[in-house]
Image (cartoon, coloured by chain):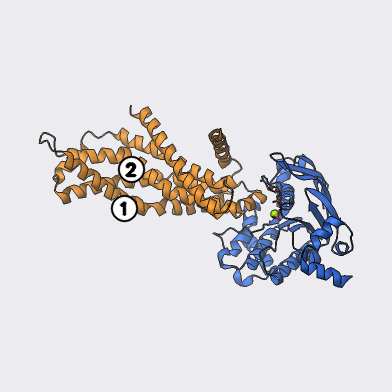
Amino acid sequence: MIELKNIKKSFDGLEVLKGISMTFEPGKTNLIIGQSGSGKTVLLKCMLGLYSVDSGSMLFGNRPLENMDDNQRRILRREIGMVFQGSALFDSMTVLENVMFPMQMLTDQDEKSIRAAAHEVIDRVNLNEATQKLPAELSGGMQKRVAIARAVVMRPKYLFCDEPNSGLDPKTAIVIDNLIREITKEYNITTVINSHDMNSVMEIGDTILFLKDGLKAWEGNKKQIFKTDNEAINNFVYSSRLMKKVKEVYQ
Amino acid sequence: MKLLHHIGAYLLMLRLVFIKPTKAKVMRKLIFKDIQDLIVGSLGIVAFLSFFVGGVVAIQTALNIESPLIPKSLVGFATRQSVILEFAPTFMCIILAGKVGSFITSSIGTMRVTEQIDALEVMGINSVNYLVFPKLVAMMLLPLVINISMFLGILGGYTATLYGGFSSSADFIDGIQMDFKPFHVFYAFIKTVVFAIVLATIPAYQGYYMKGGALEVGKAATVAFVWTSIVIIVLNYMITQLLLA
Ligand SMILES: Nc1ncnc2c1ncn2[C@@H]1O[C@H](COP(=O)(O)OP(=O)(O)OP(=O)(O)O)[C@@H](O)[C@H]1O
Ligand SMILES: [Mg+2]
């Protein structure tokens, strides 16, 4: 479980996060949605420890991040997996090497068991035929699957995904979304996903945090999002013609 | 002000190169890969340039000797001095600022813009150590390359002299051996080691702290080349003043 308490963050006087509180639960896909520039990536990077917050508290299963010493942070890092927006695969390494990399760097296990663990998650994301390929030889959807495999090979407690299906066609996007959701449930991970894709919201929105102008404008789940009369979220959800149509039919 | 900021950030990066090291087993592989890319990969162009520039130095010297009072052995002497003192250590390092430097900036810069560096950091890996340390170690082999450059430069001078009939083989070899000071080779060696550190770290700094996309990677490589050359030229002046004057 991750608990955010009144998180604030600004860059050179520009206040990006103005006090966000939220709880993300294990075994669930927790979505952060909002318009481009609303601060989704910044919030995610704060949770990852890539940015330090100005004020507020972040608890990772009762452990406040701000009180941790270097050693405790190191332990926490090993419990975190991350899927980047552009996959961020190491382009000089094969798929197998990419997936083995975190374990080679961070554990003392022998080559054989690392290889076995890597093959297991590669199998989980259905990439058995591609283990010896380089990232440049893969399609965007396959790259995303490698990124997911690399993020979960250490069996993290926390998984962060920054727009995991941006740049993918709708069908592949749903495959990726569902893959993340299944793995989240199987391994009981606390997963936090940045998205601005309404398809994802409807598919995998177990918990939804809607950011607007650096504040939490709404919170709920994929069922509630169609019933709420919150104006801000309705403006966001029903901004496209397709979604307006969906609403008409729904009513 | 901006320059001071960069110098400060650069020094902070240098500190990061040496703390929180990567596992030795992984690091060894990275070092071998960088030796391959940076050192072995440069040998061809260094050999080619050294041989021909050495030849040109010899021809120029020979053509400018008109007085019969000046011994023919001067051609060999002048070639040796210019190759060992400046051409091999300084000129070659400027060339390598283009080749090795732009390779380092663009490979690290690409990793920055495609979030690969963020990926390393999220895993709790010291990305500066992981990326820069192996390049720094690999570049410590640069004196070897410069030695080859010295040898081929003088060989090029010798070949051009004989081929153009400017002096006899014996005169040239006389010149090469004339008044030889081993300290000059030591001076060139010191310079090369200093330049190697510059060649590895300034382009790395430019790549590591760059912002933007693919276009900016190209710009960063250009900026890295300019700064690496400037720093090499200034350091060359200072080291020469210190060691030879
Ligand atoms: N490192 C930074 N320095 C300064 N400002 C930043 C930095 N990172 C983000 N910002 C600013 O913070 C705001 C929120 O950016 P963020 O990247 O979090 O948006 P986002 O919600 O992820 O958008 P998108 O959906 O386009 O990815 C933007 O105005 C951006 O300019
Ligand atoms: Mg973003």
The chain drawn in blue is A
Image location (x, y in percent) of residue A17: 76, 46
Which of A63 and B98 lies nearest the eye of the viewer?
Answer: B98
Label 2 CB sits under 8 Å from any ligand 1 atom? no
First in sequence: mark 2 vs mark 1: 1
**Eyeballing the image, is B186 above or below A91?**
above
Residue most extreme to the left: B68
Which of B215 and B192 lies nearest the eye of the viewer?
Answer: B215
Question: Relative to residue B41, is residue B184 drawn left or right?
Answer: left
Q: Residue at x 24, y 49 (%)?
A: B156
Q: Is residue B208 visible?
A: yes
Q: Residue at x 84, y 60 (%)?
A: A234
Q: Work out which quarter of the rendered image holds the C terminus of chain A and state it.
A: bottom right
The amino acid marked with disc number 1 is Phe
Mark linked to residue B48: 1
Label 1 CB sits under 8 Å from any ligand 1 atom? no
> Residue B129's quadrant in the figure?
top right
The amino acid marked with disc number 2 is Ala
Question: Relative to residue B73, is residue A96 drawn left or right?
Answer: right
Q: Colour of chain B?
A: orange
Mark linked to residue B88: 2
